[in-house]
Image: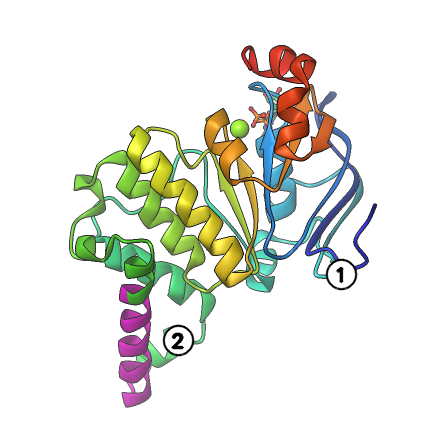
Amino acid sequence: MSDPSPLLALDEVTVQFSGLTAVDHVSFQVRAGEVCALIGPNGAGKTTVFNAVSGNVRIHSGAIQFDGKPIHNLPPHIISGRGVRRTFQNGGLFAERTALENVLVGLHAAVPNNLFALVLGTRKSAALELEATRRAHELLDVLEIGHLAGTLVGALPGGQQRMVEIVRALATEPPLLLLDEPSVGLTPPTRTQLGVVIRRLAAERGIGILLIEHAIELVMNVSDRVIVMNEGRKVADSTPDVVRADRAVLEAYLGHA
Ligand SMILES: Nc1ncnc2c1ncn2[C@@H]1O[C@H](COP(=O)(O)OP(=O)(O)O)[C@@H](O)[C@H]1O
Ligand SMILES: [Mg+2]
């Protein structure tokens, strides 16, 4: 079944690195308000799928559409500008900056013209700055880390750094959010909190979320759909219940059920 207007649609996408086929004719769709997990063993091609969607690697063949328009092989800033935001497997925050400042980077990335206003030092820029700061505080509050606004990111535990990174990616309310292993390094309670946040973003804000995740209980709890990859290929694409019941999939690709 294919939705007539999915938010994101991959059609037979193939990515090769000097002879190695990292992603092999992969097709799937993500709808607005849907949480879709991408799971599979290391080297399956999950991050490469993200890189293809966000424009960080070129696809060899196939097509990627966002909001009904082709985006494959466009530069990352153009794709980001259209509303596809991502987090990286190994973070990418400024450790020597506060949580608030890191979120402001996300907001400013969305309004490049702001730079000119800042350089010119106009009164309008001050108003924009104030508005961005208000918005950044509001977002930190939504994810329940408002009290950490003034803390240097480098001083935060891993879980809270992850939350800051998610807030930064979300700062401009992107229609589509790609999260690459967001629960790495999280304590079990923070992992649960992250799950709640992911569900809320999809349900309350209608954001489409594509989630790469190894924490299988988190995947099963938050996902509407689970896509399983192995050796560059998609080997399953179904509801968590169906994938969970597919012992062969779980044992072969995750090592445990
Ligand atoms: N930039 C790259 N250059 C060359 N090979 C790469 C690159 N990125 C990923 N690969 C290879 O592609 C395969 C899939 O990697 P990746 O997408 O990172 O898998 P996963 O995220 O599922 O662990 C691996 O064999 C990896 O070594
Ligand atoms: Mg990866």
Residue 114's spot in the image, x, y percent? 39, 75
Residue depicted at 83% across the width and 45% down the height: 1
Q: Does residue 253 lie above or below 197 as drawn? A: above
Can you identify the residue that label 1 sits on? 68
Does the magenta run of residues contain 123? yes
Residue 149's spot in the image, x, y percent? 20, 57
**Three-letter residue code for mark 1:** Gly
Residue 196's spot in the image, x, y percent? 41, 46
Does the magenta run of residues contain 195? no
Q: As drawn, is 32 to the left or to the right of 61?
A: left
Can you identify the residue that label 2 sits on? 114
Q: Does residue 27 lie above or below 20 as drawn? A: below
How many labels were placed on the picture? 2
Q: Quadrant of the C terminus?
A: top right
Is residue 256 visible in this depiction of the protein?
yes
**Three-letter residue code for mark 2:** Asn
Residue depicted at 45% across the width and 53% down the height: 200
Check disc 1: other Cα within 10 Å, few if <14, some if 14-19, many if 20+: few
Residue depicted at 60% across the width and 60% down the height: 78
Q: Secondary structure at mark 2?
A: helix
Which one is in front in this view, the residue at disc 1 or the one at disc 2?
Answer: 1
Foreground: 249 or 183? 249
Q: Secondary structure at mark 1?
A: loop
Span of residues in magenta: 120-137
Distance CA(mark 1)–CA(mark 2): 29 Å
Quarter of the image where one finds residue 106: bottom left
Residue 30's spot in the image, x, y percent? 67, 48
Which one is earlier in the sequence, the residue at label 1 or at label 2?
1
Question: Are the residues at dot 1 and dot 2 in contact (C-beta closer than 8 Å)?
Answer: no
